[in-house]
Image (spheres, rainbow, N blue to C red):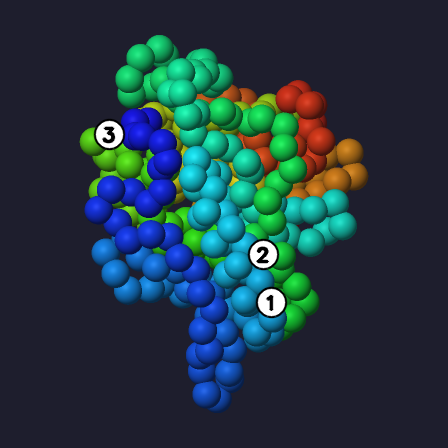
Amino acid sequence: MTGTYPRQPRSGCLPNLASAVKAGTTHPHLNVQLQLCGGGTFPTIQMVSGQRARAVAANLNTLFGKDGADLDFIHMTRYHDGTYAVVWAPVSWSQSGSTTTDIGHCPAGDPYTTNENLYRPSPLFEIATVSAEDVRWYGKPAWKIAFLWTNNIRYAVNGWNSTQDVMNPPLFSGVIRLLAEPTMWQHSSVTLQATRYGYGECQPNFTTANNDIFHTMDLVVAVPGNAAGQARWKRNQWVQVTFQGRSAHARLTDVCGCNNVDLSRGLATYLGFPGSGKVTVSNP
């Protein structure tokens, strides 16, 4: 990645700015909307409660006020009480520009050297939590709403991240596209070995096998490479992954090239998965 500190907004873009505005007449609600790079706004979150919508907008503006914040690390997660949320992992651009990593076997030198303070131990910054009111409003499960909100925000932000400011972007031309809705996994539960992967920040390898942008902290599963053509492992499905009694819903979107399932860093972290062991994949 390249760029100067501070990194927001991108050169030629309007500043990142969130606001909560009233919308709808038959079913009144508020849209949390973000200012787009070239002008105009994009609605990212709908909420019935004005207080909650204004609080989410304030949280986003607080995040946008952090000069070095890497907005590629806005992601969804699940808390231990079972609720799903949109958060930011406090990953910041290195002000010195001298912080590098070989995590994920990134080769040295551009465009692979990552000049960021990755994965430092810090509390998550909460942007929005999905409530029962949101589930009623959207008519969707909480995990689907969390993924929707997350990608809507990532679509609209005007910061430098691995897809919007990548050198010679191969697929996206500087735009994080909106996600297609996955189908539901409709097969018998299976328990098999698992591993942990991540570190999609090693450019330019930042897409999954179905061309989604890979966000290492999202709840994502990669399927066994030797079974990638089987119906059970068809990509772009919702699955439930369980490890030692703890479960989370995840998107099955990638292929690992191995004989087991691969869990993203975000999914493994939530499940308490140490890097090896068996997990159960089941219908969500």
Q: Badges 2 and 1: C-beta atoms under 8 Å apart?
A: yes
Q: CA distance from mark 3 to mark 2?
A: 31 Å
Q: Residue 126, percent across and down?
A: 60, 49
Residue 255 seen from this side: no
- Left or right of 174? Residue 162 is right
* Nearer to the camera, 130 or 13: 13
Q: CA distance from mark 2 to mark 1?
A: 9 Å
Q: Tag on residue 76?
A: none
Q: Residue 196, percent across and down?
A: 58, 25
Amino acid identity at mark 1: Arg
- Left or right of 215? Residue 249 is right
**Considering only vertical position in the picture, is 172 above or below 92?**
below
**Considering only vertical position in the picture, is 12 above or below 193?**
below
* Label whose residue precedes the other's in the sequence (1 or 3): 1
Identify which residue is drawn at 43% across, 53% down: 153
* Nearer to the camera, 82 or 44: 44
Give the quarter of the image for residue 168: top left
Q: Tag on residue 128?
A: 2
Amino acid identity at mark 3: Met
Dot 3: what SS? loop
Identify which residue is drawn at 57% across, 47% down: 87
Identify which residue is drawn at 51% across, 26% down: 118
Amino acid identity at mark 2: Ala
- Left or right of 146? Residue 152 is left
Image quadrant in which the N terminus is located: top left
Tally of marks: 3
Q: Badges 3 and 2: C-beta atoms under 8 Å apart?
A: no
Query: Which residue was labeled with disc 1?
Result: 52
* Label whose residue precedes the other's in the sequence (2 or 1): 1
Q: Residue 100, percent across and down?
A: 43, 16
